Structure formats: structure tokens, C-alpha cells
Image (cartoon, rainbow, N blue to C red):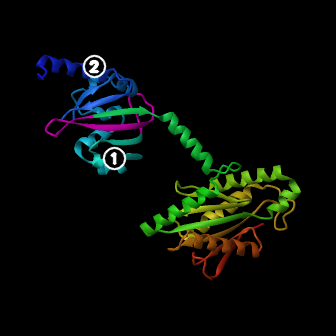
Amino acid sequence: MRPPDQSTIVQDHVFAIRLMEHLVVPTFVLDAQGHVLIWNRACERLTGVPAKEVVGTSEHWRGFYESRRPCLADLLFEGKSEELATLYAQHSLTTSGFFGLSAENWCAMPRLGVRRYLAIDAGPIYAENGELSAVVETVRDITVQKQAQIALEGLASSDGLTGLANRRMFDQTLEQELRRARRDRSSVSLLMLDIDFFKAFNDCAGHQKGDQCLRQVAGAIADQMLRSGDFAARYGGEEFAVILPATSRDGAVTVADRILASVDALRLPHPASPVARHVTLSIGVAAATGGGAPELIEAADAALYRAKHEGRNRVCVDETGEGQAAPIIPLKRAI
């Protein structure tokens, strides 16, 4: 069989380039020097960057990010697959990247001024001698699917009545924060909060008013989550929980006292309460010092029980943070 002549090879090369340029999937190719060899029309439409601006350069990142950083093709080209976890929200590789890399990430798309969630694949092209000669990167815009996923996850993790996180999300977050605290040798504090005499409120005012009360109290609690890491959840019924990362017991008491004042300021009438004319809270505070979630919850619950026993409308603190026997400090608000 005769080998193809040079003109046939050139024709095949030109055809391959034209085919790739007209693919409906946004695609670009880096050559052996890491410069853009092909930037197809679909990639122009996706990024708003014309091919003439990037072909022959290593400026392909400008289509996706506001400042220079590696694209997936660069990591494959440079053999830096270990940086995947740092740069991409989701990622995978096969046989140490020999057959390519896959990842997903939010991209700024600075030329268009929009943020897109992209699914990205980068595949190597090897020469006959086994050397890497080019890398092909394809990109798919899956923003709509990602937004739908986020919405579903939000529904699955939030309480339908109050809008706070639900019990499932609370359990997951507490475990995560405790692991982080052990790793960083920092503290985590937990507040357990209960609306005083809520059953009597419901019996007297009705369940619609009860639901309204829960929503307003939840809002007052959420208003006091002043740091990005502070976390409030509806624990169940009329009980709420607040996780305060990197917060000492004294710092948690400060937050608890703010929450008491915030609910107090609502002045929600409570005709069936023997401690005040309006809705109040009892709050238990505990700080973790190395134990697990069950111990911390038990400690905060014990402090909450003590707050109720001492007369409600107050904060009580478990001093050990681990549920062991310890003095409880009541901090009573004025009725």
C-alpha cells in the first residue's frame, strides 16, 4: 500500500481544522508550545472573544477568567493534574491524565460580563513518537442545569416554614465545623434555643399565628448571624440551633444575648406566657473543646433545660462544653 503523498496530507490537515472550526461544541486547541492553534466559532460565541485575538498566543484564559490562571488544557499540557482540586469545583482524571481531564467550574466570562457554569474536557494528542503534540479542550455551558441543582439542594436543605436550614443540614454542618475545629485547633460554640410556652401560644392564638411567630423569631435569629460562617437552623418544632465557628463560650454568650434582645424587640404578644406579655426565648450555650457532635448537643441541651428550670427568658451556659457536670451561669433578661 502506497503512503499518502504530501498534498493528501495537507488536504486532510486543512479539512480537520475546518471541521473543528465548525463544530457546534466550543473547542480550542493548544499546540506543542502551549499557544492557541484553533479557537472555533462556537468558542467565539460562548466567550465573546474572536479567534484573531487569541490564535498564536497563550491568552486563551481571557475568554473565561478576569485574571491569568491555568485552563484545564494548560494543566494537562504541563502535567499539573495535582492542581485540579485547587482550581476546579468538580474534577476527574483517568490513568494520571493520560487520556484526559474533566472538570466543572464557575467562570467569569469577562468579555460578555456574565457568569457561567462550564463543563470542561481536555484531551491530549500524541505524536507518533509518543510525545504530547497538542491538547484539545471542549467546553459546555451547563449554567441552567447547575442553577436547577442549586435550587433543588436549597429546597432539600432548608426548612419550608422559616427559611432557615433544616435539621439535616444542621447535622451535616455541625460535623463539618467540628472537624475543621479539630484540624485548626479552634473552638466551636452551639446555641440551642426554644420559644417559651409555645404550645400555650398555639392553643391560645391558633396555628396560623403560631407559624407566623416561628417565622418572625427565625428572622430575628437570622438577623444576628453577622459573620459569613455563623449558621442558624430550625432544629424541630419551636426549637432552633445556632452554630458559631471559631467562637469561644463568652463570644457565644454575647451572640445569645443579642438574639434575646432581637426577639424581645419584636414584642410579639403572648397572652398565655407567665413570664412576659410577649414572646421570649430560653437559650442554652455550650462550647466544644474536642468532643463530638452528640456531646456538644447534649451540653447545649442541658444548658437549655437549666434555662427553662431557672425561669425561662434567659441564657444558661454549660461551662465545660462537653456535657459534663459543671456550674451553669444564668444570664436573665429584663421582662
**Residue at image coords 27%, 40%:** 74
Q: Residue at x 26, y 26 (%)?
A: 38
Residue 93: numbered disc? 1
Mark 2 surroundings within 10 Å by alpha-carbon count, few (fewer than 14), some (14 through 19), many (20 or more): few
**Quadrant in which the C terminus appears:** bottom right
- Say whether residue 112 is magenta: yes
**Sooner in the amino-acid sequence: mark 2 or mark 1:** 2
Tell me: residue 281, above or below residue 131.
Answer: below
Q: Is residue 325 shown above or below 86?
A: below
Residue 33 percent coordinates (x, y): 18, 35
137 relative to 328, above or below: above
Q: Amino acid at mark 1?
A: Leu
Q: Quadrant of residue 267?
A: bottom right
Q: Secondary structure at mark 1?
A: strand
Q: Which quadrant of the figure contains the N terminus?
A: top left
Q: Mark 1 Cα within 10 Å, few/some/many (few <14, many 20+)?
A: some
Residue at 73% from the left image edge and 56% from the top image edge: 265
Q: Which mark is residue 18?
A: 2
User: Bounds of the magenta span?
Assistant: 106-135
Q: Nearer the viewer, residue 53 or 268?
A: 53
